[in-house]
Amino acid sequence: MNTAQPQDLAGELARLPHFSSLAPDLLASVAAGVRIAKFNVGGVVFSQGEAARAFFAIRRGAVKVYRMSADGREQVLHTLREGRTFAEAAVLSFGSYPAHCVALEDGTELLEIEGKTLLRLFKEDPRLAASMVSSLAIWLHGMVERVEELQVASAGARLARYLLKLPAKGAQDPLEVELPLAKKDLAAHLAITPETFSRLLRRWQDQGIVGAQGKKLQLLDTRVLTALADEG
């Protein structure tokens, strides 16, 4: 159930890249077509082939977007957390969702931005179109860089770069970081197998580069990690 007031939702939308440059009147119009959807872990946000009713912004928690291969294996496309948006293309172009999406955490909350309202405003007000096109262009550039990284960088370099980008506690080694996803989901996000992920962590622990306690890691030697990240 959506208990937030329209003005509150407008304020939340204003923090998203798609809508951050919009005038208050247009933000209010977009907010009129927004509701808060809540999910527990495993809750289905949408299924592949389902008509695209909305796109989403993550208010709290995390989601996984994935497809199933012909042989029944799960292929993770994205793992996304608070502040990220997804399924825009499904609403603006495809008309249906090209993949599955489920919540990764209990208490996940999404802003569900109604497709009908958005498409109407998109056609009626060029300010919305300009804002979203600009934001999506920046997102696309980031996706191109990610594809290039996945094609060129080794599994170890990808993992090292990811760890170094995580928010860390401490000003110098050792730094403490917390993995935001289950290890199998993080492995899928980095396009490596869970076995390779575990093998890399074990090797780095044996070499004194990282320490691990569940989802918390200690970056014991960021100099070496940086060198690994730069190897490509």
Image: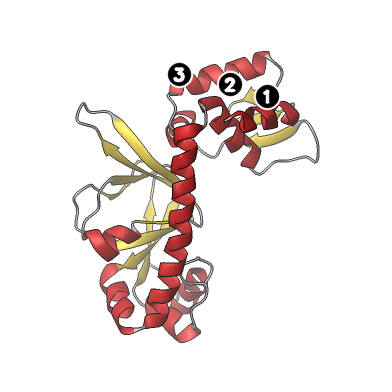
In the structure shown, which secondary structural element does the residue marked by tag 3 occupy?
A: helix
Q: In this view of the protein, can residue 70 be seen by the observer?
A: yes
| Quarter location, residue 209 | top right
Residue placed furthest toward the bottom: 25
Q: Earlier in the sequence, mark 2 or mark 3?
A: 3
Residue 53 in view here: no
Question: Foreground: 218 or 229?
Answer: 229
- In the image, taking residue 42 as reference, residue 107 lies left or right, namely right
Q: Residues within 10 Å of mark 1 (few under 14, many from 20)?
A: many
Q: Residues within 10 Å of mark 3 (few under 14, many from 20)?
A: few
Report the amino acid beneath label 3.
Answer: Glu
In this figure, which residue is indicated by the disc labeled 2?
A: 201
In the rendered structure, are the residues bearing label 2 and label 3 in contact, judged by CB atoms less than 8 Å apart? no
Q: CA distance from mark 1 to mark 3?
A: 18 Å
Position of 122 with respect to 9 (left or right) is: left
Residue 102 image point, x, y percent: 34, 45
- The residue beneath circle 1 is 210
Give the x, y percent position of residue 105. 44, 43
The CA span between labels 2 and 1 is 8 Å
Residue 195's disc is 3
Locate residue 229 relative to residue 70 in the image: left or right. Answer: right
